[in-house]
Amino acid sequence: MTARKSGRKKVSRTSPRGAQGAATKIKRPYPRVPLKKALEVVAAIKDKNGGNPLEPALVAEYCNLSATNNDFVYLLSAASQFGLTTGTIRSQAIALTDFGRQLAYAGSPTEEEALKKQAFLNVDLFRRVLEHYRGSQLPELKYLGNTLTKQFDLPEPLHDEFSRVFRENAEHLGLSTYDGQSDSGGSGNGDQASHTATVVIGQPKKRTGKVCFVIMPFSERSGRYPAGFFLEVLNSLIIPAATEAGFEVRTANRQGTEIIHATIVNEVLGADLAICDLTEHNPNVLFELGMRLAHELPVALIHAEGTDRVFDVDNVLRVLAYSPNLWRTTIESDVPALKAHVEATWENREKNETYLGVLKKLRTAK
């Protein structure tokens, strides 16, 4: 007699997450463990085995972790991403890289600090974000998220974690400004402050020799806008529009003092064009705008929607209003509008009547 086959299908004993769980796993292009903690791996290899390769279990013991714990996996991964070590939890031993050895046996505190900062910069995303914001001052997560998505293709679920780890590293290292070569942890003396009073923040794809100086607030003071609002306006709106219009973009050093140095005055008056943000009616902004107007130099005026008028400037010169929401959808429409506004201001610089010219006519008419 032939045995009857069961009608039930064979049940797979694979993980309940299955293929879908694997597909939704997000890869982090940065270490989730801060540098300060990752340096414990370097210390373990140095202290326990004189800098020679060390078994993972002994590294874990030194770091007060279990060798099979996920936290230890993340720790080893971070040490590797910072360029300090090689090897994983499955390796026979964890070894220092040449760079890690150099840091472990730094000859002075100054050298050690410099190498720590280099370890931070070894992480490509950390370096690019630091360069983008020209320092460690990041805007509010709402605006930071726009940039992380648009500029760096970082998935939204990682934004909060990335912001936290980045800030923790920056605080530990004392990072403030970044010029692409070295960090400056303090404001320096008067000469240095004057020398770094302005910075180049954007370059057009094709060099044209035209310079645009951005006149805008350093920080938010009215309480109407959250911290980081103007920095996001600068990075997501002004820089893209001005560079697409063919201008090299410069502005005052946001990480420095708000004192108007002679260097800033020279840039304000020497730039081919200026973009001036009248939002919040900042006194420094109005002073620098006054210098441009007094010398009858072209300036493209902008402000956030809902900004009150400034004297008679708004009535005489065109002011482009942008959305203060700074959503991706509003930025996508506001950038082309600002680009056109900048181009029109530049192309009509000889034709358009200046603010001072209008005032002179009014005075003559009286």
Image (tube, rainbow, N blue to C red):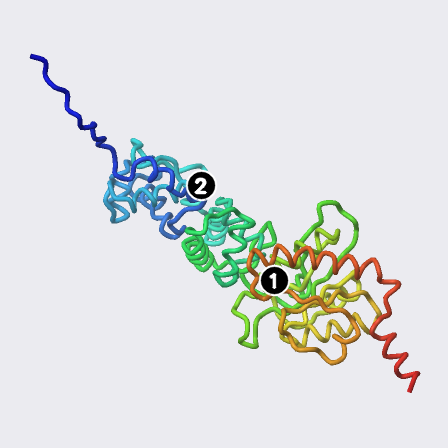
Q: Secondary structure at mark 1?
A: helix
Residue 197 location (% of width, % of height): 67, 64
Percent x, y of residue 347? 83, 58
Q: Which mark is residue 83?
A: 2
Relative to the observer, which residue lies in front, 108 or 303?
A: 303
* Figure check: 49 above or below 293: above
Q: Residue at x 49, y 63 (%)?
A: 140
Q: Which quadrant, please, contains the N terminus?
A: top left
Query: In 3D space, how far apart are the residues under numbered discs 1 and 2 (Cα atoms)?
Result: 34 Å
Element at badge 2? Answer: loop
Q: With 86 as the anchor, is 111 left or right in this view?
A: right
Tell me which corner region of the image, top left, top right, bottom left or bottom right, holds residue 103: top left
Residue underneath mark 1: 233
Q: Is residue 130 left or right of residue 54?
A: right
Q: Quadrant of the C terminus?
A: bottom right
Residue 286 locus on image (x, y percent): 71, 75
From the viewer's perspective, is residue 51 above or below residue 64? above
Residue at point 40%, 40% (across, down): 80
Residue 209: x %, y % from top left: 79, 51
Q: Tell me the kind of residue under disc 1.
A: Val
**What is the three-letter code of the residue carrying label 2?**
Gly
Which mark, residue 242?
A: none
